[in-house]
Image (cartoon, grey):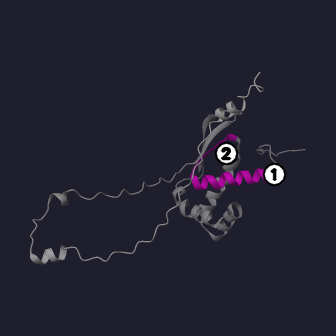
């Protein structure tokens, strides 16, 4: 009997189902928003909420529990660093938004995301050189000393590495394929 055993089986055996759920959890924590099926999202939602609750606790025991699930030190440290954004929430760290149906098998697709998404800062653009500095040019004064300084110095010719030239490739003339066939069938005895 299967009394009170109500979890999403996803048509997988137990270890495969657990691996699928953990993969979804890891990807959600890294990307903060993923697109998946509704059944998979409902399977992973309690695991993500549990991990964020552990991260809000921020103790060594909580880090060990999170590592037991995630199995990645970098991801655990990232989770615990970013957990303070959920401090003003008592629960409901994830949301599932309906997206439509998948074309091939008509599965219900959803967007599975964290409620507090960290905004990525756009990369700083390099400022172009000020055009004002070009407009305000100082008058040029030429003296004998400045001419000597700006005069090109004698440069020794640099030794350039010898470049080996490839010998020319003798290409055979292209034979026309049909022309070759015509010459075969020119004989009267072969023609019909």
Which residue position is annotated with label 2? 41
Q: Secondary structure at mark 1?
A: helix
Which residue position is annotated with label 1? 14
Residue at image location 51% in from the left, 57% down from the top: 85
Q: Is residue 134 left or right of residue 65?
A: left
Query: Does the magenta stretch mainly form a helix, a strand or a loop?
Result: helix
Residue at image location 47% in from the left, 54% down from the top: 120
Residue at image location 64% in from the left, 71% down from the top: 60
Label count reads: 2
**Which quadrant of the figure has residue 51?**
bottom right
x then y, percent, for residue 176: 62, 36
Q: Residue furthest top?
A: 192
Q: Is residue 102 visible?
A: no
Magenta residues?
A: 13-38
Q: Is residue 82 left or right of residue 41?
A: left
Q: Earlier in the sequence, mark 1 or mark 2?
A: 1
**Which quadrant of the figure has residue 98?**
top right
Q: Is residue 165 visible?
A: yes
| Residue 82 colored in magenta in the image | no
Quadrant housing the N terminus: top right
* Mark 1 neighbour density, 10 Å: few (under 14) some (14–19) many (20 or more): few
x then y, percent, for residue 70: 68, 61
Q: Secondary structure at mark 2?
A: helix
Residue at image location 64% in from the left, 33% down from the top: 179
* Mark 2 neighbour density, 10 Å: few (under 14) some (14–19) many (20 or more): many
55 over 157 or under it: above or below: above
Q: How far apart are the two marked residues, 1 and 2, measured between alpha carbons?
A: 17 Å
């Amino acid at each position: 009997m299967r009394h009170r055993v109500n979890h999403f089986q996803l048509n997988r055996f137990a270890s495969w189902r657990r691996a699928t759920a953990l993969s979804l959890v890891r990807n959600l924590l890294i990307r903060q928003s993923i697109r998946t099926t509704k059944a998979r999202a409902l399977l992973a939602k309690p695991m993500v909420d549990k991990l964020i609750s552990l991260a809000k606790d921020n103790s060594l025991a909580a880090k060990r529990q999170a590592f037991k699930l995630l199995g990645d030190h970098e991801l655990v440290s990232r989770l615990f660093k970013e957990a303070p954004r959920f401090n003003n929430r008592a629960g409901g760290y994830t949301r599932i938004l309906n997206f439509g149906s998948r074309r091939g098998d008509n599965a219900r697709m959803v967007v599975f995301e964290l409620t507090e998404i960290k905004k990525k800062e756009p990369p700083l653009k390099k400022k172009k050189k000020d055009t004002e500095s070009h407009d305000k040019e100082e008058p040029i004064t030429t003296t004998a000393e400045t001419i000597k300084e700006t005069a090109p110095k004698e440069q020794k010719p640099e030794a350039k590495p010898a470049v080996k030239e490839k010998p020319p490739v003798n290409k055979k003339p292209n034979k026309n394929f049909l022309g070759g066939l015509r010459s075969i069938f020119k004989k009267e005895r072969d023609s019909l």
